[in-house]
Image (cartoon, rainbow, N blue to C red):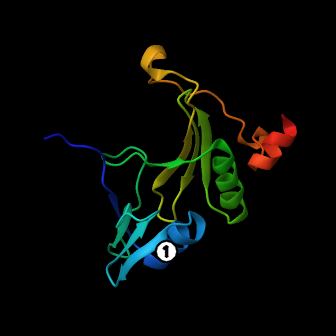
Amino acid sequence: MAIQRVGHVVLKMRDLEKAKQFYHGVLGMKIGKELPWGIFFRFNDYHHDIAVFKTAPDADLPKKEQVGLVHVALVADSVQTVRQMYDRCKAQGVEIVGTTDHKITKSLYVKDPEGNTIEIYAEVPEYNWREEGMGGMAHPFDIEAVPASVEAAIANA
C-alpha cells in the first residue's frame, strides 16, 4: 500500500464570493458544491481539486515569511495555455507575481484574492529531469514571447 498522489488542497479565505470569482471565473474551475462555509472546486470529473473554507473576516492574510503553504501548482496542457491564463489574469486585474523557466516547467505565478500564490505551469517534456536533475532551476521566462494559441505557434514556426 503506497500513497499515490495529492488528492486536493483546502485553503482558508475570508471572502467566498471573491474565491468563487477567482477559482471559477478566472481559472475556469467547476463548482462541485457550494455551502455557506465553503466551496468545492474541480477541473474535470474529480469530486474536488481545491476547496475554499470560510475563515473570520478579520483573519490575517498570508505573509511571505511564515510557516505554511508556499503555493498551489496547477498543471496546464501547454505553454500556450499558460500564456492564455497570463493574458486572462492580466485583463481581469489578477496580481501577477512573475514567470519562471524551471527547465522542467514553464511557470506563471499569480495571487488569489486573499494572497495565496497559485502557480500555473506546463511541463517541458524535452527536458529529461531524470538524467539532467532538477531543483534550484529558476531562469527568466518571457511569457509574452509565447504565442497565445496553438494556431499562432504554428503560424510563427
Helix or strand or loop: what does disc 1 sit on? helix
- Whether residue 36 is visible: yes
Look at the image and tell me in which quarter the C terminus lies: top right
**Residue displayed at 31% across by 80% down:** 37
Q: Quadrant of residue 4?
A: top left
Would residue 23 be found to the left or right of residue 148 on screen?
A: left
Residue extending farthest bottom? 36
State whether residue 71 is above or below residue 20.
above
- Whether residue 15 is visible: no
Neighbours of disc 1 within 10 Å: few (<14), some (14-19), many (20+): many
* Residue 34 percent across, percent down from the top left: 38, 81
* Residue 44 percent across, percent down from the top left: 46, 63
**Residue displayed at 42% across by 68% down:** 41
The three-letter code of the residue at mark 1 reads Lys
Front-lying residue, 83 or 13: 83
**Residue displayed at 47% across by 22% down:** 129
Reading the image, the residue beneath label 1 is 20
Would residue 132 be found to the left or right of residue 39 on screen?
A: right
Would residue 88 be found to the left or right of residue 25 on screen?
A: right
State whether residue 52 is above or below residue 72.
below
Residue extending farthest left? 1
* Residue 83 percent across, percent down from the top left: 69, 48
Look at the image and tell me in which quarter the N terminus lies: top left
Q: Quadrant of residue 38?
A: bottom left
Front-lying residue, 134 or 3: 3
Front-lying residue, 3 or 10: 3
Number of callouts: 1
